[in-house]
């Protein structure tokens, strides 16, 4: 006998067909008899809830096929869902809506209706057939037993929920209620919702519950084993065991005992100081007692590795052959006699004395003069290894001294790191750009260098990481800097300052001829091509295409010429011999970039040639002055600095005080304005050395006497007319020689500096040494026949003592 299932019908409040707003759901399936909170933010969804609240609070709840779709279409929404009721609606401040909905019965979408504000659908009820009582009871019992078993494993399920589940007698309601409390996949939940016959739904739910229970049990077993192992050996030991097990499976495990034995052998073989040996043995004992892969063991092992890798007593053999050293230094650099002589002196003393502390030299000079390359040559000449450390931009004291071991990732400072890298304890150590260091809240690195560069202290340099004394006294430290004022005075006091003032044109020409041209010919592949530079072409490149103290730009311009020649060689143009003449330089390098200072062509009133020093060498400085009707004002132009302006004012005061002796009209300073100008006004100028040039120009203008055009001068002037010494004499003489000057007037006190000027230049220039401004005027101004420069008069009325009295007067 076949039992025909009865049809279970919903209550009469739900008709067969309904027009309802649809609420698309993401990551949730709402079953019948299920109450769920929903957070709704999409406009159409909010409108759908509003429509439901305005009518009978009924809404159709259907899940999206893909949760990531923000604006779903009809195809993106499943057709089977749940007819539900909105129990509560709460609008939140951010514009979203919190809704509490309750599922009632299953429903299926018949068709979608056109509505721009929200999804509106026509729904048909899905009626569920009843199943035989025996089968219903059996399946229901199986579901309840499986749920109780799962509840025992999952402590998050309360006993009240288990009791409520057991009390449900309706098979369909039981299946939906139990399914709502499991975290099945969305596909499985939707499958349960779409399974209409209760017996089939209960069977599917039973399979899913058993699978979920097995997964949960397995997860608990795995976590239990891990927890038990971690409780025995702690977390670090557990991780260590896991790594060892993985290595063992891969066949690459190393025995930690063998590593420690090898490390112990290295410690015994290493020769180091007593303090370092004792510290290493102490740390090694600690290491043997630690878990090999623990963080603390790694720190201790790294510390020991650093100590035994340092060159405590490893030395490079120093070459003391002075003649060979001189030959190497001359091969690498032209000129630079002072630093070369200092290295030769060091080698001579090293030959006579077995132990000598390494000197600490500081090469100061403009960029490109060869400071760093000279340090390399020193290493080659002495047979030492060379290492360079750039200090430009270093602002942390720990860069020099290292970090203490208490910090994560701590390391020694750059000094110790460099010594480990080079492998000897007596290299030439070049600290480059020592004037470019800065300081901040982390400390002052220049202060940390005080110990490193002090010969009386660096035999026991203490790095923060090592916390051991290390001997740096055998190192030959060479520092380089562009300007001396940027280096702190205590640091300057610990170094022997050697100035590299920059190359003269004569020296640049030799460097280009002997070093730069052969180097660039080789680098540009022109060894097999005959290329010849004339002396005038090199001089043209130096004067018209570069403006520097060193030779870097000169090398670049020579390289540019060689590249142009290489192009012609590849294109097979031109002759086999390439002659670079003064005219062809412009063809390869374009129009000249700089103009050279040239002497005036004729003697003129108020125009004086001065001499100036710049970072890139000496320059001729033209000083002009004139007078014009006015009220006695002094006008100074030419972008002059404060010192130069004050020097001009001192010159004017001197001339006014000597007015009667120079036969200048007494009231001229009330009737005329004096304008002093120094051309090339875009270039800043400063310094006192143009004082006598300005005074000579003013006297020339006021007395209407011209100045010799081939005379140049430099010197500071005082109010009493004394001429004080100046700096940069060598560069100024070179500029005078280059500009065709025949006579140069300099202060008497600069006589000692004449020995630095090449004899080939000093022989071509008439050098006049002066102590007073009167002597300057005598040599600079042109007198007409029968004319006298000075009027015999007493200087007392002008507050000026006679010269012989002045020399005996005390300076105040």
Image (cartoon, helix red, strand yellow):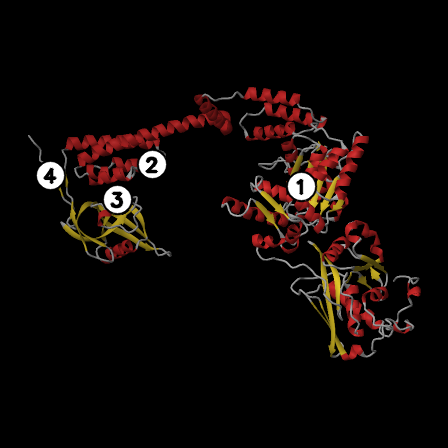
> Which numbered disc, 1 or 4, marks the residue that appears first in the sequence?
4
Which of marks 3 and 4 precedes in the sequence? 4
Name the residue nearer the viewer: 371 or 134: 371
Q: Secondary structure at mark 3?
A: loop
Report how far apart the C-alphas of labels 1 and 2 lie in the structure.
79 Å
Give me the disc on residue 157.
2
Foreground of the two, 505 or 348: 505
Marks 1, 2: nearer the viewer: 1
Specify the quadrant of the image occupied by residue 799. Answer: bottom right
Q: Is residue 612 above or below residue 252?
A: below
What is the CA distance from the residue labelled 1 to the residue labelled 4? Answer: 104 Å
Q: Quadrant of the N terminus?
A: top left
Which x, y percent locates residue 438?
A: 65, 48
Q: CA distance from mark 2 to mark 4?
A: 35 Å
Residue 67 spot, x, y in % from top left? 30, 45
- Sequence-wise, which precedes: disc 3 or disc 2? 3
Residue picked out by circle 1: 373
Instruction: Name the residue that disc number 3 marks.
Output: 65
Disc 4 vs disc 3: which is toward the camera?
3
Residue under label 4, please give it: 6
Q: Residue at x 66, y 26 (%)?
A: 280
802 with respect to 776 (left or right): right
**Label 1 to label 3: alpha-carbon separation:** 72 Å
Mark 3 neighbour class, 10 Å CA radius: few under 14, some 14 to 19, many 20 or more: some
Q: Earlier in the sequence, mark 1 or mark 3?
A: 3
């Amino acid at each position: 006998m076949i039992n025909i299932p009865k049809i279970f019908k919903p209550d009469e409040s739900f008709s067969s067909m309904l027009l309802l707003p649809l609420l698309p759901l993401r990551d949730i399936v709402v079953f019948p008899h299920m109450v769920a909170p929903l957070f709704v933010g999409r406009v159409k969804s909010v409108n759908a809830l509003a429509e439901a609240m305005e009518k009978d609070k009924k809404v159709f709840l259907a899940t999206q096929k893909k949760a990531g779709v923000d604006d779903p279409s009809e195809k993106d929404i499943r057709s089977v869902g749940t007819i539900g009721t909105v129990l509560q609606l709460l609008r939140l401040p951010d514009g979203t809506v919190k809704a509490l909905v309750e599922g009632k019965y299953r429903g299926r979408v018949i068709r979608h209706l056109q509505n721009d504000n929200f999804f509106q659908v026509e729904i048909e009820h899905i009626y569920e057939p009843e199943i035989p009582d025996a089968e219903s009871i059996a399946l229901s019992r199986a579901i309840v037993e499986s749920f109780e078993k799962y509840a025992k494993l999952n402590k998050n399920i309360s006993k009240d929920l288990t009791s409520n589940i057991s009390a449900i007698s309706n098979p369909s309601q039981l299946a939906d209620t139990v399914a709502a409390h499991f975290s099945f996949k969305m596909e499985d939940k939707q499958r349960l919702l779409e399974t209409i016959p209760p017996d089939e739904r209960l069977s599917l739910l039973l399979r899913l519950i058993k699978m979920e229970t097995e997964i949960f049990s397995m997860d608990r077993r795995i976590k239990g084993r891990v927890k038990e192992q971690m409780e025995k050996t702690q977390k670090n030991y557990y991780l260590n065991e896991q790594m060892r097990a993985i290595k063992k499976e891969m066949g690459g495990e190393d025995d930690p005992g063998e590593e420690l034995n090898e490390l112990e052998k290295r410690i015994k073989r290493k020769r180091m100081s007593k303090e370092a040996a004792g510290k290493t043995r102490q740390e090694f004992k600690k290491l043997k007692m630690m878990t090999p892969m623990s963080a603390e063991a790694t720190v201790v092992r790294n510390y020991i590795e650093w100590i035994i890798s340092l060159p405590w007593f490893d030395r490079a053999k120093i070459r003391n052959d002075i003649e060979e050293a001189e030959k190497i230094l001359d091969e690498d650099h032209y000129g630079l006699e002072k630093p070369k002589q200092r290295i030769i002196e060091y080698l001579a003393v090293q030959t006579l004395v077995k132990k000598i502390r390494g000197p600490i030299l500081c090469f100061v000079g403009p960029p490109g003069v060869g400071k760093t390359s000279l340090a390399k040559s020193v290493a080659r000449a002495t047979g030492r290894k060379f290492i360079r450390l750039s200090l430009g931009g270093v602002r942390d004291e720990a860069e020099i001294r290292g970090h203490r071991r208490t910090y994560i990732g701590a390391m020694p400072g750059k000094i110790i790191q460099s010594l480990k890298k080079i492998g000897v304890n007596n290299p030439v150590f070049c600290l480059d750009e020592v004037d470019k260091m800065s300081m901040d809240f982390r400390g002052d690195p220049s202060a940390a260098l005080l110990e490193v560069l002090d010969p009386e202290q660096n035999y026991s340099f203490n790095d923060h990481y090592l916390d051991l004394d290390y001997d740096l006294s055998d190192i030959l430290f060479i520092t380089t800097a562009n300007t001396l004022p940027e280096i702190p005075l205590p640091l300057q006091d610990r170094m022997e300052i050697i100035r590299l003032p920059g190359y003269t044109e004569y020296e640049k020409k030799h460097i280009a001829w002997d070093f730069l041209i052969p180097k660039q010919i080789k680098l540009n592949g022109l060894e097999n091509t005959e290329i010849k530079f004339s002396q005038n072409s090199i001089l043209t490149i130096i004067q018209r295409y570069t403006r520097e103290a060193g030779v870097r730009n000169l090398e670049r311009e020579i390289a540019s010429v060689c590249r142009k020649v290489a192009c012609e060689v590849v294109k097979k143009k031109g002759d086999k011999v390439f002659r670079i003449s003064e005219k062809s330089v412009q063809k390869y390098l374009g129009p000249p970039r700089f103009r050279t200072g040239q002497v005036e062509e004729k003697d003129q009133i108020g125009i004086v040639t001065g001499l100036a020093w710049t970072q890139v060498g000496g320059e001729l400085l033209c000083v002009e002055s004139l007078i014009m009707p006015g009220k006695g004002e002094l006008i100074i132009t030419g972008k002059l600095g404060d010192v130069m302006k004050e020097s001009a004012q001192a010159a004017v005061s001197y001339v006014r005080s000597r007015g009667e002796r120079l036969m200048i009209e007494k009231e001229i300073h009330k009737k005329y304005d004096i304008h002093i100008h120094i051309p090339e006004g875009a270039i800043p100028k400063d310094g006192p050395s143009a004082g006598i040039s300005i005074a000579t120009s003013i006297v020339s203008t006021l007395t209407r006497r011209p100045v010799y055009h081939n005379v140049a001068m430099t010197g500071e002037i005082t109010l009493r007319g004394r001429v004080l010494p100046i700096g940069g004499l060598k560069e100024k003489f070179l500029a005078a020689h280059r500009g065709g000057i025949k006579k140069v007037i300099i202060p008497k006190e600069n006589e000692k500096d004449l020995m630095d000027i090449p004899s080939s230049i000093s022989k071509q220039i008439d050098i006049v040494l002066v102590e007073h401004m009167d002597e300057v005027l005598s040599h600079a101004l042109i007198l007409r026949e029968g004319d006298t420069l000075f009027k015999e008069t007493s200087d007392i009325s002008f507050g000026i003592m006679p010269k012989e009295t002045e020399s005996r007067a005390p300076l105040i």
